[in-house]
Amino acid sequence: MPGDAVVVGAGAIGAACAHYLARSGWRVTLADRDDFGRGCSYANACLIVPSHSHPIPGPGAIRQAARWMLRPDSPFYVRPRLDPGLLGWLWQFRRACSPEAAERGFRALLELSRAGLALFEDMALEAGLSFFYRREGLLHVYLSDAGFREAHHEHVALQEAGFHARLLDRTEALEFEPALSPRIRGGLFIEGEAHGDCYAYVVALTTGLEACGARLITGRGVSRIVVQGGRVRGVQLEPPGGVPAAAARSAGSHSEEIPADLVVLAAGAWTPALAAPLGLRIPLQPAKGYSATVPAVPAHSSVLRVPLLVMERRVVVTPLGDRLRFGGTLELAGLAPGINPVRYQAVVGAGQEVLASPPPMDQAEAWYGFRPVAPDGLPLIGFAPRIEGLIIASGHAMLGFTQAPITGKLVAELADGRPPSVSLESFRPDRF
């Protein structure tokens, strides 16, 4: 029978877990160290794209990463540092780059992503759940003849995976998307892909949770997961006001403990730190990404109709109603705060490069967030080993928004003892 559940982390994944648990009859508490959706879900690229279900490691990934490491503005960067966790992660990443591992990972992620997109379609029609969502496809654009030649191979691979896609030469691409710059060399349009406002999605889910009686806690992180006798008993919250626990104890203030029959650890890049005191090794690295969001100015530029992926730069340009967002880069630099101006400007510049009339950037909202990435590029979804009542739901890398609703549904199915609607074998938290 459903009981009390605490979900730790209120990004797209955590909010979806809380949503589906509440629908299953669990009494839900959703807690986050920040405001809801203000972490990695706040200003990401907002794509819902099963076609991008290839895991990050794969054949040629090491060689490509080595080339990019020599460029400060490249799509991928690892900050050199003496970090045993990073070194172990990189070693496992290397092992996951085989063709066999990449193919297995792609098939597993593709099933998860397609199930996520199907649930977005349902959610878009759900009464009382309102957020910006469009299903108008995704356009890859190419800035070089060599890049466009690669598009032919991508086209074949997409068709083999069951996607409807079509190649567009330069003239066809400009006719299809008039907002494009004439400097592009061609495009590849993938039908049926979607995009939406990830932050608005989280707000819609948390608003619905509050309306149905869930307890929502913001600005107070979970300091530890309480386990007794091999089973979860609840969580302990950090003291209010950001006071360190030691200082709070000396001042006579006590951390609050919330009892629970079930705890879902969906804290993104902060998941390993909460799992480690329990003897659980969760090998995730925070991969920093940047974005710039600007008001769309129809009088200044053609309004972009569909999201773009600038293939040579690995930068996404996403239309979000009255806003336009440039997003990209993957930087393994730990949880170091702040924006690297060279890398941020590379993202902005790539977006501007493919638009005929780029919008002015004087009102741009600059942002960075940490995507949680496992060394094999697959998320961790399932019960934690040796601890009854603890579910891990983290490590979704660049597919967190795409896979959020299906992850939430799977967590509720696990909690209820129902068969999962998608095989979880590839996503077992104990696979490392």
Image: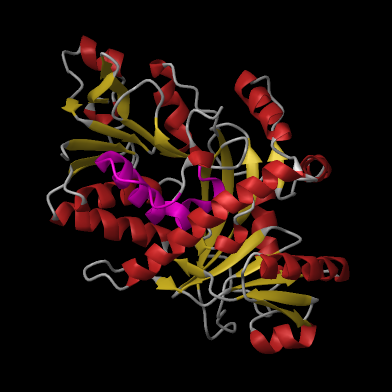
> How far across and how far down the image is residue 275, in percent?
41, 24
Residue at image position (45%, 39%) is 394
Q: Is residue 38 above or below residue 196?
A: above
Q: Is residue 213 above or below residue 236?
A: below
Q: Main secondary structure of the magenta part?
A: helix
Q: Is residue 399 magenta?
A: yes
> How far across and how far down the image is residue 96, in percent?
69, 37
> How far across and how far down the image is residue 247, in percent?
27, 14
In this view, the residue in front, 394 or 207, is 394
Residue at image position (57%, 36%) is 374
In this view, the residue in front, 368 or 378, is 378
Quarter containing the N terminus: top left
Regarding residue 31, the answer to whether it shows in the image is no
Left or right: where does residue 424 sit relative to residue 70?
A: left
Left or right: where does residue 50 sit relative to residue 417?
A: right
Left or right: where does residue 200 sit relative to residue 108?
A: left
> How far across and how far down the image is residue 423, in percent?
46, 47
* Quarter where residue 274 is shown: top left
Q: Is residue 335 above or below residue 101?
A: above
Q: Is residue 370 magenta?
A: no
Residue at image position (42%, 59%) is 198
In this view, the residue in front, 179 or 28, is 28
Quarter containing the C terminus: top right
Most extreme residue toward the left, as rendered? 213
Regarding residue 320, the answer to whether it shows in the image is yes
Count up the numbered dots. 0
Q: Which residues are magenta?
A: 395-422
